[in-house]
Image (cartoon, rainbow, N blue to C red):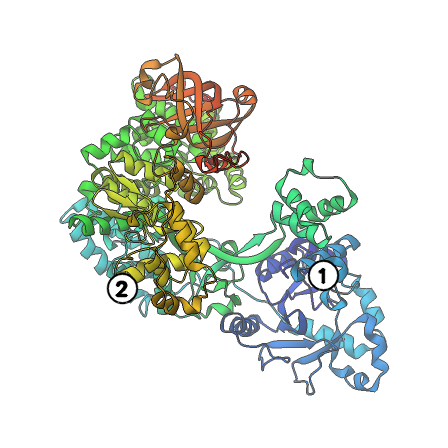
Amino acid sequence: MFLNCHSFHSLRYGTLKIKELVAQAKCSGAKNLVLTDINTVTAIYDFKKECENEGIKPLAGMEIRKENRLLYIAIAKEFSGIGEVNKMITAHNCDGEVLSETAPGFKKVFIIYPIDNIPSILKENEFIGIREEDLSLLVRPEFHKLIPKMVILHPITFSTKKEYNLHRILRAIDNNTILSKLTEEDICRKSEYFKPEKDIIKSFQQYPEIIKNTKNILDECTFEFDYKERGSTENKNKKYYKESQEEDIKLLTKLAYEGFKKRYGENETARMRVEKELNVIEELKFSAYFLITWDIVQYSNKMGFMHVGRGSGANSIVSYCLGITDICPLELDLYFERFLNLNRTSPPDFDLDWSWQNRDAILEYVFKLYGKDHVAFCGTNVKFKYKSIFREVGKVFGLPKEELDDLSGSPIENHDRNSVVKLVHEYGKLMEKFPNQRSMHACGILISEEPIYNYSALEMPPKGFPIVQFDMNVAEDIGLEKFDILSQRGLGTINDTVKLIKKTRGIDVDIRDASISKDEKICNEYLSVGKTIGCFYIESPAMRGLLRRLKCDNYKILVAASSIIRPGVAQSGMMREYIFRHNHPNQFEYFHPVFEENLKETYGIMVYQEDVIKIAQYFGGLSHADGDILRRAMSGKERSIQKLNEVKANFFKSCMEEQGHSHELTAEAFRQIESFAGYSFCKAHSASYAVESYQSLYLKVYYPLEFMVSVINNQGGFYRTEVYIHEARMSGAIVQSPCVNTSEFQTILKGKEIYLGFMVLQSLETKIAQIISEERENNGDYKSLEDFIRRIPIGIETIQILIFIGAFRFTGKQKNELLVEARLMLINFKPENRNLMLIEEPVQDYKLPELKREYFEDAFDELEIIGFPVSCSPFDLLETKYRGSVFVKDLLKFHKRQVKMLAYLISRKHVPTKKGAMFFGTWIDVNGDYFDTAHFPDSLKEYDFQGGGCYLLLGTVEVDYHFPTLTIHKMAKMPMIPDPRYAYDEQKRYDAHRLVREDVSMTSRKPYPQAHEIGLPRQKFS
């Protein structure tokens, strides 16, 4: 009897999770249940599974609303009916088609109209829904005559009084209003909860025809759908790249062998690997997946874009030969079975990266090539988050902004305890994990054989590419496998650097040349000392520290480092153990011969996902399928630890009964595997990252100024712009603040001079910034401030920003003088008279008294406008002339000794420990060299950070495998000179000091284990 059920996927309306909805239906005695969420089919596939688990017949449909007004309820007679409704909603969402008051001519859909929207003529498949509380209306002639076309309408939206209140809160949030202003039209009726089905039928016993009509719909409808079967490679993706499987494998084979000749020449080992892979690909019917990916890469190459192919796809020699990836699997002994094996049922995993500047062009190509009916992004549910819950719920209760800020910005324990705040907490907790809106998956694209609206209605988010209404997990369940097309700034930096080198030096750099992007002497020297600021993936303090501890001086160690730094390896303690064994290869024995045979390259330590598969197979005797379950358990995806537990018993049984290992030996091997069940990389993924890291390092080493300009223009990486400007200076650059006659929107390089772009001026409108350089290019340099004002549509506030940053220094006039000139020119000025007034009435040549400026006034202007000084160093702004007793270049000599240093704070990272929070700091000394500090909880209690700036540090130097760290005992922030611009305003003299920045990163991970806690055996296990 329940033809109209809402789950919480009826966004900001329903209150019931799918599991709760079905459980309550079962308790009410329902044998059939129809899910009709508002304008969406997000949950129908999970709903079907849940119903079948509970012995209820699932049916699917949709409630069609326009601007919150119910038009009708659509219930699919069979699965194709869902496609009909989806197609209509997609046209509305994506093409702006207006939803009509009545349903179109659906073929496989029943329609139920509410009593306030009855069309003049009802088609055969159309009915009117009558609620229990509206039965008294049937005595009226205009309704009585329609009884033969009526069905029972008992909508479901909530289950308890508290949930009804929650529904009202959700509706107020959706309408951006307070609870007291909600109208009856905004909310559901108070009767929309489950009642025993027999009670509902009893209420309609005077109208057997209505009961019969309702039962007929429930009996006639079905929701039959083929989920992807376990063990099957069949899916709903585009089946063929050409016209058939045979044509696809023929083309793939041709392309693979053409690429093989280019990559390898006559290498027999490589040829056999290509042949082996092609056989597996054909048997698994994955040819189309490879060819579609190859086609995208071909288009990218044609457009001159740079891409990186990574993920487990980089394990494949076929993908290497096709040019999808640039990693040779033979060189790195990559494990093919991690990528493809006959037990695998889902297509291989290609992660394709493009520059953030080029990704949209790739997406447009894919959407245009396969058509809007067959391509969409995966959706994702954006849930109500901690801060937004308190803000949104507090708002509907009418709390003022100050209280909302306090609620969303402070910990729960600090909240006021008045009655309203208690209600905010109470209902906020109920809303946790509720979906708030649908959004676009970061990278997952679906390309379907049948029209994609057969499976989901599409929506059009602001980014301009359609999305399906379900997430990647549902997509996988129903057999739609995604293609991952991602963007990153590292590739943009590399690409822009190569172009800039061509422009400034006339040199063509083939950055994909393996001889320069994998093994180069000076690059290796930079790697070994962690001189990698700006380089993709290897610039963070933690990574630079790891590179130094490993004395990483070649590509292969860099590949290992790229995975060792991941949380799974570090958290398990294997990172620390790897560092020990790398530095002391003669001070340990292999745990077991299998570990030596399979993990010799990583000193018997599991570093990559493949390592766990190898140990599961060769030590544990597990099948490859079970080994892959262990691999998935490490991937950090949902339910991974549960899967790990499922296979544990099997591992112990196999080890002890079939392999003859003792319980102690088996337990230790599994402990090592289990500790690894977090985020880690497959080796191919690490290798792909390492190639890109090395490419960026090569450019940094040989073309440092071009590289740093490109880093700045791609908006950096781990650090703020100030740090990259510092790096450029350390490489010999002369850094200039923006100038209207030289600068462009982006930062540019002229010889050794770097002119910061207008993009660093946060208060300057992007449009104005672009007009300045365009106008100069079209009509020549600006001759004066007057000439600039005449040519650029600009107001006094913007002119002041440009004057204060020194953008008119070419005039030779002081900033004070320019400010007076600008105000005189623009007083009573109307933009429409710009050219007329300024041409006909030249500005009077005023003789102003000479206004003397203090030396550091420019630095404080820069600090205020762009967040850091350009014309001097932060050290120059200190009151003290002291610069420290010890400098970074000498730290290695002071192991275990106490030193005093003066340093400028770059960044700090919060790390939880058993004794409380600690921080790791990154600093530069007066010579511009980087070093790191450790701040333990005891020290922080008395000597905490006081924001950005320079600090006097007292601590002990600890050298850990070639890497010095200063353990801080005391520190104090050093005062800056008063702001000379406000010599006569005591209150403002220290305002700018608060603008000095620091980068703070927080983590909630558990503390990394100490050496004595790792317990990894360094002797052969007996």
Q: What kind of element bears circle 1? A: loop
Specify few, some or many for label 2: CA neighbours under 10 Å numbering under 14, 14-19, or 20 or more. Answer: few
Q: Where is residue 7 in the image (x, y as percent from the top left)?
A: 66, 59
| Looking at the image, residue 95 lies above or below residue 302 | below
Say whether residue 181 is left or right of residue 926: right
The three-letter code of the residue at mark 1 reads: Thr
Q: Which residue is drawn at 59% across and 81% down?
A: 104
The three-letter code of the residue at mark 2 reads: Asn
| Looking at the image, residue 906 lies above or below residue 466 | above
Q: Earlier in the sequence, mark 2 or mark 1?
A: 1
Residue that carries the numbered disc 2 in the rendered image: 778
Q: Which residue is drawn at 32% across and 53% down?
A: 740
Q: Nearer the viewer, residue 169 or 630?
A: 169
Say whether residue 824 is left or right of residue 216: left
Residue that carries the numbered disc 1 in the rendered image: 157
The CA span between labels 2 and 1 is: 63 Å
| Looking at the image, residue 548 lies above or below residue 475 | above
Q: Position of residue 331 (x, y in %)?
A: 23, 40
Specify few, some or many for label 1: CA neighbours under 10 Å numbering under 14, 14-19, or 20 or more. Answer: many
Q: Position of residue 671 (x, y in %)?
A: 48, 28
Q: Nearer the viewer, residue 688 or 893?
A: 893
Q: Quadrant of the N terminus?
A: bottom right
